[in-house]
Each structure stands twice: as structure tokens, then as C-alpha cells.
Image (tube, coloured by chain):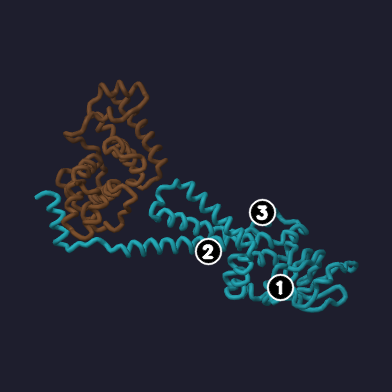
Amino acid sequence: MTKTDAELVRASLDDMAAFGDIVERYEQKLYRYVRRISNFAHEEIEEVLQETFINIYRYLNTYNPKLSFSSWAYRIAHNQMISAVRKKKARPQYVFGDDDVDILSLIPSDADVEQEVAQKCDNEVVAQALQELSDKYRDVLVLQYFEGLTYQEISDVLQIPVRTVGTRLNRAKKQLEKSLADRL
Amino acid sequence: MTLKKQVLSQLKECCEKPIPRWRFVLRGVLLYFVLVTLFLVTSLLISLAFYYLTVNDWDLYAQVSVPLMHKVFSTVPFFIFGFVAVLSYLLYVDVRKQGRGYRFCTWRVITGIVIAVFVSGAVLHVLDGGYRLDRYTINHHPGIAKIINPRLRQLSNPERGVMVGQVASDLVGNTFFIDNPYDGRWLIVLPNTSTKYTQYVQVGNHIKCAGSVTKPQVFEATYIMPFHKQLPKEKPPLEVYVK
């Protein structure tokens, strides 16, 4: 039977080997997340992830089982990525991977122009448009539409109020639409 | 080497262990302690401000013609409000540092803090918290008392027609002496026909007067009342205000 995250955390506190299961479970998810919000190469992402998992292990005792473990892990990865970006002094950029699906199909909107845009534009154009978004807007878009997190989980990852998540998402979508409309 | 192996080998190499839970518990307790302390201090300062506003001697200003802004600046405890603002900001930061403090909107946290400290300050004021703090600062830290409550200096202003002091002599005819903490001894002259204020002229009493300067160190008073009427009977000499 598959162990829950909370059970794995408890086991990891006594046995370091059990922590390997946590690494295995979240390695791919966090890899994709870091790649999506950074312009890092594969090796740099691996470094960030390594530091992320080491920090997760160090701070295992701060994990609150009432909250989602994945949100907590994303938050540590997010902070680690930000500190890596600061070190590198580079602005994070959206990077596409082979496993990414059509982005606009993931971002729903009532605007007619968007449907038109969704049919016409390719991922490269969207990637550029996303690059133009400020970090705070890109973060919520990626967490909502690529990582599939709920508002509450995004709030826990970015440590902002839930209402702020909603506001940022709305603004991010509008800015993205405008930016895409200008390009096409 | 897979990431899992890399992570586990690095953890082993560096002999990493999860940081003990007690350190996080201690941090949480410290944050709560700071929160409660800041809240109490801020509430106490609010109660002190309420106290100063209730004994602000507006009646004396009603007797003389001074600009409204002068009245406001000399009676509103701006220093306390400034300090309260700083402490409230620290309270805000503390709330944000609490476990799930990030979940609340900024304006809700700020509004909550402001309402809580004002309500708590009002309750403390009713329980004489501000009065006791005022007594304590005057008796033990007169320098601080002078800073947080500049009212005495503002009311020791004969040129503007206001004067406070301690009665230094009995009434002789219609004159008596008072010791003003800033300008020394003054002769106070009462109008010949007036007797309604003589009850306040007893050696050692703190009084406030409205009137005008007629000669050097001579003040003709048209209005006299006890100063700082909530001072206890065992009030300290007025000099402690200006030590």
C-alpha cells in the first residue's frame, strides 16, 4: 500500500532512507516546476532540486500535517529557486519542455480574442509573452494552470492571501491576453 | 547517479539531521511572547494618550485667544501616537511571521490591530492604566515624562496668556506667588473684586492661570483652576517635570 506524505515524513524523521521515497515522489513534479519558472539549464535545475530536498529534510520538523505536503515542498523549491536566481542575477524566464501541452488551452478566458489567439499562436509566442510578465504574475499562472494547484495551495506556496492569488491570476490573464493580442 | 542517490549521499556525507522540533516550538513561543508584549505596551500607550486627552486643560485655552493649531499641537500627544504607530508596525510584522499569518489581507491585519489596541487601550484607560503609567513616568523617569507629554511646557507660556505653577505663598490681599518650573517665581495678581478663585490658592497646590503679563514676573490672572486635577494628593513637586 502506498504511504501517504505524512507517513513518509514521520518515517523519514527516524530513517533517512525513507526520505528517498519523498525524493522519488516529488522529483519530477518539482523539476518541471523549477524548469517552468526559471531559465535554468538541466544541471542548474538539478542543483536547485538537490538543495531543495536537503532543505526539506532539514526542516521536516516544521511540516504541518494539516497543510498539503506538496504545497510545502513547492514553497521550499520556490524559495530555493529565487535564491538561485539571485545568485545568478538573472531574471527567471519561462522555458518550454517537450512535455508541455498547448498553454492557451490550459488558460480559460471568456474573451473571444483568446480563442482566436489560441488557435493561431504557437508555444514560442506564448513563451515570449509569459517572459514579459512580472515574476509574481508568472508564478501564479504556472502554479494554477501547469501544476494544477488550488488557490489555497498557491497561497501556501507563495505565502500570500488567497484573495491576492485571485487578483494576481486575473491580472496575469489580462496582461497575457493583451500581450498575445499585440503580437498577433 | 539519480537525484535520490545524490541527495541521500549528500545528507550522509554532511551528517545532516532534521533540525530539532523544539527550536521551532521555541521560535513560535518567542513570536507569541513578542506579540503579547507589543500588544500590551501599545495598549498601555493608547490608554496614556486617552488619559492625556481627558486632562488636556482645554478649559484654560478657552480663556485665551490662541490659534487652533497651537491648541492642537500642545494638547495632542503626538509623540505617543508616533510610538504607537511604530509598535503597531512591529505587531503587523509579528502577525505576518506567525505560522499562517500570510493568509490574511494586509488591510485586515492592520485594521484588526488598530481596533484591538484602541479597544484594549480604552479598557485600560477605564481601569486607570494611563493614569498609573503617567504617575510612574513622572515619579521615576521625569525626563521621559517631559518628552511624552510636552503639555506642561506649552502651558507655561505667560506671553500667550497661560501659566502653570505651584503656589509658593498664601494670599496677601489679592496677590500671591507661584513657582513656575521654567520661568521661576511669579507674582500673581487677582482682580480686586474676584473671590471665586481664592479657594485654590493654598501653598503647594498646582494651579493653572489665564491672564496677561503686566510687568516683568507679574501676571494678572483672570482665571485660576487646579492644574492636572487628577494628580494625587501626594503629588510630587512640580520641579520633577523639568529635572
Q: Residue at x 61, y 66 (%)?
A: B129
Q: Secondary structure at mark 3?
A: helix
Give the chain of mark 2: B
Q: Is residue A18 above or below residue A45?
A: below
Q: Secondary structure at mark 2?
A: helix
The mark that comes first in sequence, 2 or 3, is 2
Q: Are marks 1 and 3 on the same chain?
A: yes
**Residue tagged by mark 3?**
B69
Amino acid, disc 3: Met
Q: Is residue A67 visible?
A: yes
Residue B37 placed where, x, y %? Answer: 48, 64
Q: Is residue B111 above or below residue B56?
A: above
Report the Cα–Cα distance between label 1 and label 2: 33 Å
Give the chain of mark 1: B
The mark that comes first in sequence, 1 or 2, is 2
Q: Is residue B79 visible?
A: no
Report the Cα–Cα distance between label 1 and label 3: 24 Å
Report the Cα–Cα distance between label 2 and label 3: 29 Å
Give the chain of mark 3: B
Amino acid, disc 2: Val
Q: Which chain is brown?
A: A
**Residue tagged by mark 1?**
B180
Q: Which chain is cyan?
A: B
Residue A24 placed where, x, y %? Answer: 17, 47
**Residue extending farthest front:** A1
Q: Please give the label number shown on residue B41.
A: 2
Residue B204 placed where, x, y %? Answer: 74, 77
Q: Please give the label number shown on residue B137.
A: none
- Callout count: 3
* Relative depth, front residue between B236 and B210: B236
